[in-house]
Amino acid sequence: MRRYSKQLSVVLTMLICVGSWVSRADAAPPESRAKAFSTGAFDPFIDYINGRIRQGWEDNEVEPSPVASDEEWLRRVHLDLIGQIPSAELVEQFNKDRDPAKRSKMIDKLLEDPAYVQNFTNVWTNLLIGRRTPRRVSRNGMQKFLREAFAKNRPWDEIVQDLVTAEGHFEENGAVNYLLAQMQNNDEAVQVTAATTRLFLGIQVQCTQCHNHPFNDWKQNQFWEYNSFFRQMRRINHRKTDPKTGRQIDDYSEVVATGFNGPVYYEKRSGLMQVAYPIFEDQKVDPQSGVERRKEFSKLIVQGDKPLIATAIVNRMWGYFMGYGFTRPVDDMGPHNPASHPELLNKMAEELVKKDYDLKQLARWICNTEAYNLTSQFSRNNEIDSPERGETPLFSHMYIKNMTAEQLYDSLIVATGAHKSGQSNWERAEEQRRQWMGQFMVAFDNDSGDDSTTFNGTIPQALMMMNGDLTKNAISAERGSYLNQLLTEKGNDQVKIRKLFLSTLSRYPDRREINSAQRLISGTPNKLAAYQDLYWALLNSNEFVFNH
């Protein structure tokens, strides 16, 4: 456990003070809305999105929160687009920039940052194969496929088509790892069917595998009609001899096509056997041999002005950036679960199709909206906009989001230089990352056995943040760390306190925070220990570990 200084009470006061940023909702009066907010982007479609969201505010008699400060917004857009907080130097530069289009330009800059590719590779690798890599699945192959796709900004419909039609070696064609991850059991492509419709079409038909859904229009036959598209494939696991032990070990896996033809048979609850043919949206595919059903499926899902694949990715991306999608959950769309802004969702899907499924353009639209640029603080005028309590999201303020494991790790690195503390080479730094992510997996599992991919403030998570090796390295003040650099620089305590806040919270401290920090430092004989306690308090504050 961490050894606390005698100024523990002051440290805890700092935690409470810093952690209460969300409740300071009424500190800033709402700004005048006479002049419409703009990031400086000249795109009429962004104005359309803003208009539809504003209409929702008016219809529900809600007044939006003020526009977020540059510091709050810059931290948010960095976390969302490149998966880490901005450096202290970048925050200072952005604050000094007087260009009225600086937010729009920053969005464009981050979309071209190599870290954007890595961030969305992480996001989609976890969605497609899970955080724990299933047996005989190549995580490297999956990541390579996604890195190349996001680096080239390939159209989303092409990416999905490659994933659902993939065949071959799991590293030579990394897309097959999505299918391999769903084919862990000999379940006649049941899991592949459920995952594909949920991830790419935004519909949950898995509940209809055994019976008609009691609360929506999905029927049992629809599940098996979709399933019949995925019956013409199987996985082959290859093994090889270990030259050291002489034992057989895993070598590689692949997906190969099979000669399956004809209908699929399934059993109703009554015991009657039924037949299902490959049908999607009332379009039937020839069930006989010679027809590659997965390829036909990949063509059908992109047909129309706003196919399900388009509305699904718009809803998922909106939820990723805004904290909540137009439906809850984002992968359960349909008449039984109406969208909060159906006209906007449909229009965004149509425009995305016109833009050839350009995901960067979709991100650019969302990040330039007025709603995305609002503060996370709310007031009495919009406190009813509370989706976490079951209310329909109105997006009148930014909803607080949990950091993912990768975001939290990389943000700790940016804030502290902890990977450099006591490290001498890249390999050791990468090994430290792998070890920390492994600890995250062990400590952050939940009761249901699923992987916990975000920081939710549980006791194991809190203990890991307070006492984990990465945090210890961060506050050790060893050569190469940010704290070591700070303490050797010129400047008084107030200057150094301001820099600590800027490096961790991406903002300057207010007067109360400066006073509390100065009392901590001046009241401790060991100044290094005082700075370490202050740094520890900032890194463990709610304001640091959440994306707001």
Image: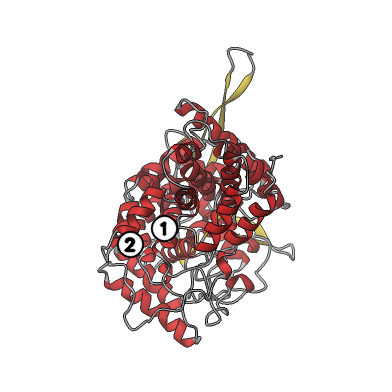
- Measure the C-alpha gap from mark 2 to mark 1: 9 Å
| Residue 141 image offset from top left, x and y in percent | 46, 36
For disc 2, the marked residue is: 103
- Viewport quadrant of the N terminus: top right
Q: Residues within 10 Å of mark 2 (few under 14, many from 20)?
A: many
Q: Quick one: SS at disc 2? A: helix
Between 278 and 24, the residue placed more toward the observer is: 24
| In front of the other: 227 or 149 | 149
Vertical position of residue 302 compared to residue 257: above or below:
below
Q: Can I make out residue 150 in this image? A: yes
Q: How many marks?
A: 2
Question: What is the three-letter code of the residue carrying label 1?
Answer: Val
Percent of width and height locating residue 65: 47, 75
For the point 42% across and 33% down, the residue is 172
Quarter occupied by residue 464: top right
Q: Of the numbered discs in the image, which one, if any, rests on residue 77?
A: 1
- Residue in the image at 57% along x and 49% along y: 539
On the image, the x and y values in percent for residue 389 come to 63, 73
**Between discs 2 and 1, the one toward the N terminus:** 1
Disc number placed over residue 137 in the picture, else none: none
Task: Tell me whether circle 2 and circle 1 mark residues in contact (CB < 8 Å).
Answer: yes
Residue 46, relative to residue 59: is it above or below? above
Task: Identify the image quadrant of residue 300.
Answer: bottom left
